[in-house]
Image: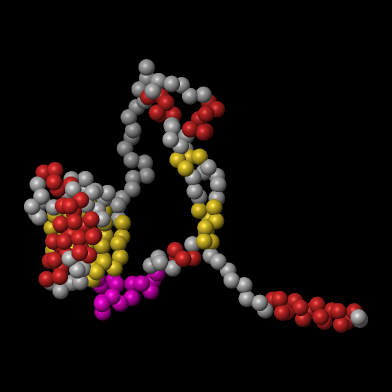
Amino acid sequence: MSFRRLVSDLGRLCIQTASQSVAVQQQRTIHASVRAADSIRDAHRQGTRVAAGRVETMEGTTGAGTQTAVNTSSLDARLPTAETLKQQFDGVAYHELPVVYIRASKNNTLVTVTDTKHEVITSTSCRLEGFKNARKKTTIAGQTTGVAAGQRLVRRGIRTVRVQVKGIGPGRMTCVKGLTVAGVRVVSITDHTPLCELGPRPRKIRRI
């Protein structure tokens, strides 16, 4: 076999190899770690002293330096995009849908419905639905409030809404369930609960 023929065959093989399509998967690097149960503060409160070598193992998280590659292509397909704002739901654009604001505190659940101009359509709470005192902070009260708000929306001809939840009270998701029970279609649920990064200053360590 001549050298020229060998070069031509090799070039043809490279072209065929390059023309093959390769499926590429989108992956992200996610930090996964398990929180350490013990801390130096707990040890001080119990009156025990911590050696200097155990400080790094007790504070922070274990395995914080590990990285895991996870395929997020299926998850990214469910996240909203710029085209979602123009998507039609029952003939109404997404950004023109009424918004149901749910304030789930530890003692009550407040529901307020506004339009795109932030004008209040209707509002209710567990107290207005007949729950008093400690009964306001139950899951049944939250669901009843959601059903009542949903029935008011249906009577006004509103059957498709967006939901924005704030707070971690007991009526958090039961109120959303009550809306769906009343016949209201929930397009999206947004969690708007604020998270304090630092928060208030903790109590001083007790010294014995």
189 versus 170 height, above or below: below
188 versus 49 height, above or below: below
Q: In the picture, residue 85 is in which quadrant? A: bottom left
137 versus 29 height, above or below: above
Residue that appears at 58% across and 69% down: 24
| 141 vs 39, nearest the viewer | 141
Side (left or right) of 195 relative to 129: right
Residue that appears at 23% across and 55% down: 174
Residue that appears at 26% across and 66% down: 186
| 134 vs 66, nearest the viewer | 134
| 187 vs 53, nearest the viewer | 187
Determine if the magenta segment contains residue 94: yes
Instruction: Give the extent of the magenta segment.
Output: 81-99
In the rendering, at what x and y percent does residue 119 appear?
16, 66
Side (left or right) of 15 relative to 108: right
Q: How many marks?
A: 0
- Would residue 196 be visible to someone looking at this image? yes
In the rendering, at what x and y percent does residue 131 appear?
10, 50
In the rendering, at what x and y percent does residue 144 appear?
15, 57
Q: Quadrant of the C terminus?
A: top left
